[in-house]
Image (spheres, rainbow, N blue to C red):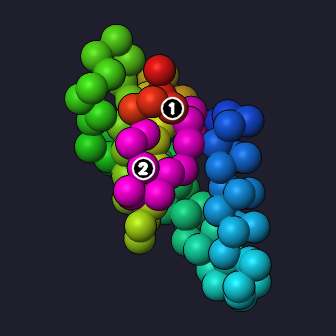
């Protein structure tokens, strides 16, 4: 079972998503954050679940989708993944994953 480690940046992204949605609907914000978190939990048993982010070749960066969001993570080993960020699908995430 892989350990899931959140970077500070990823935690900030998730908090910002929550705050943005909560300005209109705290209930919806909670649902989105919970859905993202639950999707990430799948990585415990399936660390290579997501599609490889091909633009980065020196590291195994992958992404899984939840609604309009792209969850970027780094596979360090079969036993460890690092959540790098959660991005809206319209964003060009490669500038954040250098």
- Report the residue marked by disc 1: 96
Q: Position of residue 24 (x, y in %)?
A: 71, 85
Residue 13 appears left or right of 38:
right
N-terminal of the pair, mark 2 or mark 1, is: 2
Residue 67 appears left or right of 32:
left
Q: Position of residue 29 (x, y in %)?
A: 68, 77
- Report the residue marked by disc 2: 91
Q: Tell me the residue at 50%/51% (across/down).
A: 87
Q: Tell me the residue at 71%/46% (across/down).
A: 11
Of residues 81 and 78, the one nearer the viewer is: 81
Query: Which quadrant of the figure has residue 48?
Result: top left
Neighbor class of circle 1 (other Cα within 10 Å; few <14, some 14-19, many 20+) is few
Of residues 63 and 26, the one nearer the viewer is: 26
Q: Is residue 18 above or below residue 45?
A: below
Residue 80 appears left or right of 22:
left
Asked if residue 83 lies in the magenta stretch, the reply is: yes
Of residues 40 and 87, the one nearer the viewer is: 87
Question: Which disc, if any, is residue 82?
Answer: none
Q: Is residue 69 above or below residue 4?
A: below
Q: Is residue 66 above or below residue 72?
A: below
**Residue 1 appears in view:** no
Helix, strand or loop at label 2? It is: loop
Q: Which residues are magenta?
A: 81-93
Q: Position of residue 98 (x, y in %)?
A: 47, 20
Asked if residue 66 lies in the magenta stretch, the reply is: no
State the predominant SS element of the stretch in magenta: strand
Q: Tell me the residue at 41%/67% (across/down).
A: 68
Q: CB of mark 2 within 8 Å of CB of mark 1?
A: yes
Marks 2 and 1, how far apart at CA: 10 Å
């Amino acid at each position: 079972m892989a350990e899931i480690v959140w970077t500070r940046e990823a935690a900030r992204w998730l908090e910002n998503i929550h705050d943005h949605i909560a300005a209109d609907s705290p209930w919806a914000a909670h649902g989105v954050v919970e859905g993202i978190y639950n999707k990430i939990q799948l990585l415990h048993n399936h660390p290579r679940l997501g599609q490889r982010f091909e633009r980065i070749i020196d590291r195994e960066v992958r992404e899984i989708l939840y609604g309009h969001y792209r969850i970027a993570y780094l596979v360090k080993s079969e036993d460890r993944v690092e959540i790098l960020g959660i991005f809206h699908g319209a964003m060009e995430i490669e500038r954040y994953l250098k």
